[in-house]
Image (spheres, helix red, strand yellow):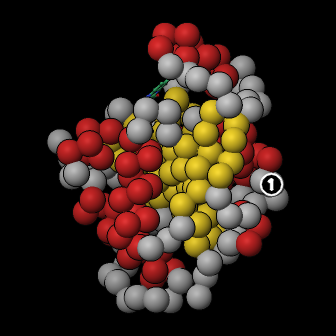
Amino acid sequence: MEKILIVYYSRTGTARQAAQALAAHTGWPLAEVSDLSSRAGLRGDARCVLDILLQRHVGYRYAGPAVDECQRLVIVAPIWVGHLAAPMRSFLRDSMPLCCKTSVICVMARQGAFKGAEEIARLATEPPSPVLALRQGDVASGAALQDLRAFAEQVDAANGRAVVAQRPAWLSPREA
Ligand SMILES: Cc1cc2nc3c(=O)[nH]c(=O)nc-3n(C[C@H](O)[C@H](O)[C@H](O)COP(=O)(O)O)c2cc1C
């Protein structure tokens, strides 16, 4: 059986909530990438935007098991300006070559999740699968739980632990 690790970055709690719900449902261990310095407030917003636009490598803290010991990394992160949040992108770049399989959950206000997944595809040896896009409002309301369970089933199916109906590798947010 694959050793699976959920690694998340969250600035304001949405990705954390999704990652924790997935961990509670599956029992997969959690690891956190966090900021070295606060991104709170307007100055924090501006730094997020600049980090993306200038493609800066940013400092971060990692708390969790060694990534090179897992066979599948489930990456949970927000979208910033149509890209993967800078701390997660920096963490993944520093973890290269990413030889394990990857699965991705991007949280967002409205759009951009698939661009984030494409960035991960460029960093990993094979494209991430499954990929799940979640809207912030659905995570907050609990409506995303159903999608998170379906995502876990897809990972289990890829891992030979369950037989589920074939579904697309990319799961879109539910319709409003
Ligand atoms: C600087 C910045 C840029 C953002 N850009 C986008 C975007 O391009 N598309 C989108 O749908 N949401 C965007 N968002 C919203 C976040 O993706 C959304 O609030 C997400 O749920 C935050 O996750 P977190 O609470 O785990 O930090 C942006 C947020 C910030 C702070």
Label 1: which residue? 96
Q: Is mark 1 within 8 Å of ligand 1?
A: no
Q: Position of residue 96 (x, y in %)?
A: 80, 54
Vertical arrangement, residue 144 with respect to residue 1, above or below: above
- In the rendered view, does 109 fall on the left or right side of 85? left
Q: Badge 1: few (under 14), some or many (20 or more) residues near its Cα, within 10 Å? A: few
Give residue 50's quadrant in the image: top right
User: Which quadrant contains ligand 1?
Assistant: top left
Name the residue at 56% across, 22% down: 39
Q: Which of these two is toward me, 62 or 106?
A: 62
Q: Which of these two is toward me, 117 or 35?
A: 35
Three-letter amino acid code of the residue under disc 1: Met
Name the residue at 62% across, 45% down: 33
- In the rendered view, does 33 fall on the left or right side of 136? right
Name the residue at 45% across, 82% down: 157
Badge count: 1
Considering every residue shown, the one lying at the far left of the view is 176
Is residue 12 visible in the rendered structure shown here?
A: yes
Q: Position of residue 89 (x, y in %)?
A: 67, 41
Is residue 171 visible in the rendered structure shown here?
A: no
Give residue 121's quadrant in the image: bottom right
The C terminus is located in which quarter?
top left
Give residue 36's quadrant in the image: top right
